[in-house]
Image: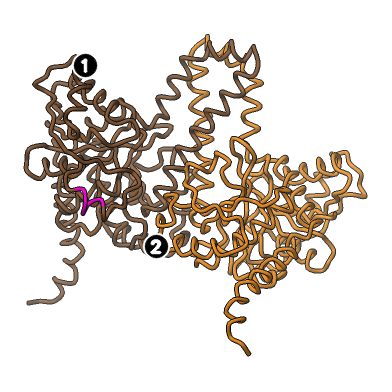
Chain colours: A brown, B orange
Amino acid sequence: MLIALDAMGGDCAPTINIDGAVDTVNEQNNIDVILVGNEPLIRQQLRKKRFDPSRITIHHASQVIEMLDAPSSAIRKKKDSSIRVGIDLVKAGQADAFVSAGHSGVIMATSLLLLGKSRGVDRPAIATLMPTLKDPFILLDVGANVDCKPENLLQFGLMGNIYCKLVLGRNQPKIALLSIGEEDTKGNELTKEAFKLLKNTSLNFIGNVEGKDLFTGKADVILCDGFIGNIALKVSEGLAEAMLKMLKQEITSGSAGRIGYLMLKPAFRNFKKRTDYDEYGGAPLLGINGASIISHGRSTSKAIKNALGVAADYARKRVYEAIATAIEGELVASSAAPASSMEH
Amino acid sequence: MLIALDAMGGDCAPTINIDGAVDTVNEQNNIDVILVGNEPLIRQQLRKKRFDPSRITIHHASQVIEMLDAPSSAIRKKKDSSIRVGIDLVKAGQADAFVSAGHSGVIMATSLLLLGKSRGVDRPAIATLMPTLKDPFILLDVGANVDCKPENLLQFGLMGNIYCKLVLGRNQPKIALLSIGEEDTKGNELTKEAFKLLKNTSLNFIGNVEGKDLFTGKADVILCDGFIGNIALKVSEGLAEAMLKMLKQEITSGSAGRIGYLMLKPAFRNFKKRTDYDEYGGAPLLGINGASIISHGRSTSKAIKNALGVAADYARKRVYEAIATAIEGELVASSAAPASSMEH
């Protein structure tokens, strides 16, 4: 698989992006990378690295989208941005997938503009993996759609189901709706309507789950609108960080604590790995007709490497085509009943 | 202060409720308690305890609201429930405040029915304290109103401001809106409209905060609709629990780890205290014309004790009256401009 990586997106670009690309080709045989961005800058940084030069190429792009750019004007005015040039490579068939840790709004809008939506999809969604006490689960949407209709949540369910089957390899994924109580009568107007739609599908819909159930491994795929999803994701990240800081403050405030801390270091390292969002790398844009993957703006080189892995897997398994097939199948199924009663 | 405590509400009622009441009168001079519920049962359990019998009385109520009861029918059919009887004591002036760890929907609805809303308030809200790296902040609404209008969020801001000033003793509390980006253009339809309303008030409105900012102490009061607030609260509780479990698994999986754990025990105990929701006790119903306080369904006796403390403070400072005054003042201020330009 050949992945176009936005070298200029993210808080520590291009350094960590380049590191992530180099680590990837050094550790994996089946992923090659095109670094998209300021060619002289990238070439200079690459010079210090050791890797097979046939497996990393550079594709120049003269402009960079800044995090404060408004998506609409950025897309109109920066036609040679690393995001646009990278997605264009996918469109032209010169790359199998695109990865960026840059402006997620611009990545989504440009992916929509150039690659379009999968057949039957109304609104693409950003799907992210989150850790639990058991296996990770998929949360979507985490930010693409802040105001949703019940039909959007239904489609998120169909898309998340396919993604979970193909990429996580789980049969019959348990699909749940994020709400404020388990009964179907609990929730807001949106979730109550979405509940009715979801229970009439072929999905293994297990009903509502609450915020406290997120990390217990109750569901494989959890659905919500992009506003809620973003809040849930950011609250989790913020709390995980705050808890580790508090714990460190407590631990290093006494000398017995300091010795204990040293003895516990391996345990802390394992723990951090289990709760580390870097481990889960990229969030694909489900419903886009192609492989376009968002990595966290604060990505480390490990997160970039993992996002490149997600992108390669997503493209290899052609998840976007499976999504189109699944949504068309569900539309046919739901229209079958009235059609057969019409007797032409 | 004399507080009516629902002896029958919560997962471990009446045992921990009675323990919380006994601990309160033994530790605090200025709070007496009326235990509301099944008199023979309460009397039997109280017999084993040591306390000044003049400071805990029992008020019989023959019925109990179960967590699965639908609020509307529970209120109609269970007229002698411990929740209703307790709130009736406040209404009749026989208690200064009411505390319950029972069905929050029924507590809210019954408080509305019997005590009514503070003047000028459209929708009461549940306000809870949450821990941060610095001081705790107030989050509201955490569940009373799942679908809100921008005007509701404005009133939540006015109410939270008063609560923060009077109960936490902070001057000029920093009020923020929970959203998915800091700029006023980021958010859903609700938050974008609420942003406009909030910036035209006398409040110290600092704009949007994101989910990741919740635990950094950026704001004193954070506003959201009840659906979002409930999700944010439950996600936090769930993650804090999951992280402690994961950490314990890691720590006890090696013998060096076990020794380290013993050395760190005091640090863990302090840490747990800082992140412990029990420490923060009760969530008052802001906008109800009287003191009605919800305690967590999984409350321990410490949480009940802290909720009784919150209730006494809330009643003593007559927060509900200050809220009515503040909302009336803001309504006058906002209508002053157009009125003065009309020149009658």
Give the foreground label among 2 and 1: 1
Quadrant (top left, top right, bottom left, bottom right) of the C terminus of chain A: bottom left
Q: Residues within 10 Å of mark 2 (few under 14, many from 20)?
A: some
Point out which mark residue A49 bears.
Answer: 1
Q: Is residue B76 visible?
A: no
Q: Secondary structure at mark 2?
A: helix
Residue B107 place in picture, x, y as percent = 65, 61
The tally of labels here is 2
Segment tinted magenta in the rendering: A74-78
Quadrant (top left, top right, bottom left, bottom right) of the N terminus of chain A: top left
Magenta segment's dominant SS is: helix
Query: On the picture, is A88 further left or further right than B329?
Result: left
Quadrant housing residue B161: bottom right
Frontmost residue, A38 versus A157: A38
Residue occupying the point 50% across, 42% down: B213
Residue A111 place in picture, x, y as percent = 19, 48
Residue A193 place in picture, x, y as percent = 37, 64
Three-letter residue code for mark 1? Lys
Point out which mark residue A190 bears.
Answer: 2
